[in-house]
Amino acid sequence: MAQQRRPLAQVAVVNAERVKQALRAIEEYSKLLAPELARQIETIRYEWYTLEKDCDIGSPSRDIAQARLYVLIDGNDGKIVKLVPKR
């Protein structure tokens, strides 16, 4: 079975998420073995967030503009706070 090609933007979004996950994992692991390295990785991770934003990779603004329903979730316990239909 042939694999379908994804749009370039989708490939960029998926791989940007992989970079974030990898940097988080390396940072957490480094905290145990090399705290100074962990701080450097944290800096790189935040630089990646800035780069991602500057390149408009994974920008949720397009998705939000097309949404028909918004779900607000409380960050503390993950409970749904409110469902807000788009007007």
Image (spheres, rainbow, N blue to C red):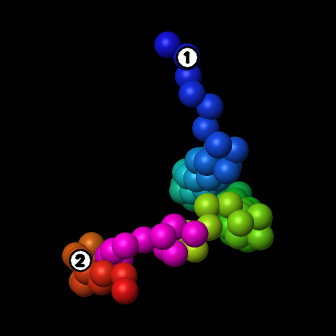
In the image, 54: left or right of 28? right
Identify the amino acid type marked 1. Ala
Q: Which residues are magenta?
A: 62-72
| Sooner in the amino-acid sequence: mark 1 or mark 2 | 1
Q: Nearer the viewer, residue 11 or 32?
A: 11
Closer to us: 57 or 39: 57
Give the amino acid at mark 2: Ile
Q: Residue 8 is drawn in which quadrant?
A: top right
Residue 86 can be seen, yes or no:
yes
Answer above or below: position of 5 versus 68: above
Q: Which is closer to the viewer, label 1 or label 2?
A: 1
Disc 1 to disc 2, how far (Cα)? 40 Å
> In the rendered image, which residue does mark 1 sit on?
2
| Residue located at (55% from left, 16% from top) | 2
- Asked if residue 47 can be seen in this view, the reply is no
Mark 2 sits on what residue?
A: 80
Q: Secondary structure at mark 2?
A: strand
Q: Within the magenta stretch, is there residue 70? A: yes
Could you say where residue 48 lies in the image, as x and y percent from the top left?
A: 72, 62
